Amino acid sequence: MKAVTEFFGCKVFDDRIMKATLSAEVYNSLRSTIDEGQDLDIGVANAVAIAMKDWAVQNGATHYTHWFQPMTGITAEKHDSFITPSPDGGVIMEFSGKELIRGEPDASSFPSGGLRATFEARGYTAWDPTSYAFIKGKTLCIPTAFCSYGGEALDKKTPLLRSMEALNRQALRILRLFGNTTVKCVRTSVGPEQEYFLVDKEMFDRRKDLVFTGRTLFGAKPPKGQEMDDHYFGVIKPRVSAYMEELNEELWKLGILAKTEHNEVAPAQHELAPIYTTTNVATDHNQLTMEIMQKVAAKHGLVCLLHEKPFAGVNGSGKHNNWSVSTDTGVNLLSPGETPYENAQFLLFLCAVIKAVDDYQDLLRIAVATAGNDHRLGANEAPPAVVSIFLGDELTAILKSIETGTPYSAAEKTEMKLGVNVLPNFTRDTTDRNRTSPFAFTGNKFEFRMLGSSNSIACANIMLNSAVAESLKIYADRLEGAEDFEGALQEMIRKTIKDHKRIIFNGNGYDDAWIKEATEQRGLLNYRTTADCLPHLLDKKNVDMLTSHGVYSEAELRSRCEITLENYCKTIMIEANTMVNMARREIAPAVEAYALEVAKTASLKKSVLEDIPLAYESELLKKLSGLTCRISAATDELEQCLLTVGQISDVTEQSAAIRDDLLAQMTKLRAACDEAETVTARKYWPFPTYGDLLFGVG
Ligand code: ADP
Ligand code: MG
């Protein structure tokens, strides 16, 4: 087998290939587009298109596609072949700069949340040269943004790029104030840790709930779950290890820096983490990673479940978004640094994040809101739906001393006054890692942990970048006009700490007492469900902030709100329909069949021996019949509720009814069915159980 260094990135039109195949002039021009956002000349685009096509054809590609991320949260592609007829009856392979830069997929079926009336169904895709093109199968994939004819973003990439630009603009203003004239560009980087489950494909196929909804809607607790904690970081089983090996190879070929892999807390649960990279590339890579995880699983007779909560009572899957801000000169602005001067700048960026997270708690919650993730946030393994920041003891103590104007006694006991030049040196926090915080500072980056495993990371980063850009803007506005820079800086840091310290919490985020304290004493938000939080996307403060930085227009925000709520409603209604179907056509008949066997046994026994004791059979029969009655009644009620809910036309009202009524009916039906599972003979049970699924992959 080839060494990784030899095949890494072999399917990517990356910098190495660009350098080798483009003229110096074209290469430099493209680089300045990539690095500095310079406009792209059509001549350059033509040259790049030809080089890209030649390289792709040499590597087996016959087609190309503009690869984009519509608001469904997954990726879309429409393949065109390179062939053009030649006069002699043959074909030549052609690809032009125009085709590279812009495409027009027939986009009328992608959700637009009212942004695009069907009569102007045309949407167009525009090349994002900052994310490398790559080959998937026989197709050259060109990462693109997707917009309506009127220029409204119909995707997740466009607002993400805008949010990165917003943060860049404001961070540069701050750096200039600190006397830095060399930095050209500030970017955010992300390393998303991806959790997932692997189950056996043959078992998966026998469960309609998994097939239709990606999660189990029924299933009694197995005799063994995750209570032993024997899976976490445990030895990886051979079948899983073969899967991971192939997955890594496929990812590496695509230039994705898959780095670590391990078993997670729940049985059958695993995690994959890449090395961090620029946010929009990390987002593209994460989408590709999720796709390839599923593809490779199929080759191994497995199914990769990316749902946030595939199994009740077992840990769900999330995605940890490790986020930092750095300059093109390689300085991480969230790194505490060695000198007091750097520390002051660090403290200002730290404060910007603290302020952003407190001011826009709602946007962060909204960014991760899906029907699936609602099961996780607030359950006892994931961060709660309440947003708070973990800073660790040392940073918290430093902030406290700044707030109160009292000396901070670090190890070397430097007395701290508040002047920039006498800020103390401090090092990476050495306290234990806190795994329960939704938003944790981990040395030189923040780890936002509320994302669900199937979420696109775009949304979380759009909100995070924008909110931090807003804090920085407020700071820059104030500092640029200040006569006494250092005095104003100190004052602002102190004020931020005072105003926003309520968001800092270093304790156990899973604790009920915390939720009480957070909501009752600190006034933090607790939006438990998607239906609760989503309407707040359109709160004035949020619309004002996001539009003022040019990240979203108001119309774009309305469309996102509508699409997300619609998605929530549809998802849960499909689940409810699936439950009705399974309960009526599989579960109730199975319980009845078993009851019949019990009845037959009793009757046969009695025909042999008149006074034989039949307590077991009669009790069981009573129980089984009672359960089928309960199942049948609950199925009817759920079906009725579905009808009622389905008639509500306003999506906000519908989502509230689903949250309040439909989910409760689903829980009721599930309870009856799960109880039936525990008393029905195994051979009658119509589909694999939790035990089968969770422990079935050897
Ligand atoms: P953990 O102990 O949580 O696994 P790691 O340091 O291994 O922490 O990092 C987890 C993820 O964070 C990886 O994807 C890693 O690449 C990413 N990461 C590390 N440093 C940074 C940084 N400065 N900015 C963004 N992500 C980072
Ligand atoms: Mg982590």
Image: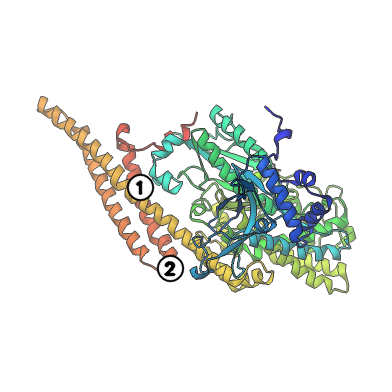
Residue occupied by mark 1: 671
Say which quarter of the image contains residue 126: bottom right
218 sits to left or right of 368: left
Identity, as a three-letter code, of the amino acid under mark 2: Glu
Q: Is mark 2 within 8 Å of ligand 2?
A: no
- Quarter of the picture for ligand 2? top right
Q: Residues within 10 Å of mark 1 (few under 14, many from 20)?
A: some
Measured as percent of width and height from the top left, residue 150 is found at 60, 70
Q: Residue 653 shows which numbered tag?
A: 2
Looking at this view, name the residue that lies furthest to the top. 608
Give the residue displayed 33% in from the left and 60% down from the top: 641
Tell me residue 283's x, y (percent).
Answer: 64, 51
Between label 1 and label 2, give the one nearer the viewer: 2
Q: Determine if residue 397 is in view.
A: yes
Q: Quadrant of residue 20?
A: top right
Of label 1 and label 2, which has the lower sequence position? 2
Residue 372 in percent (x, y) is at 49, 52
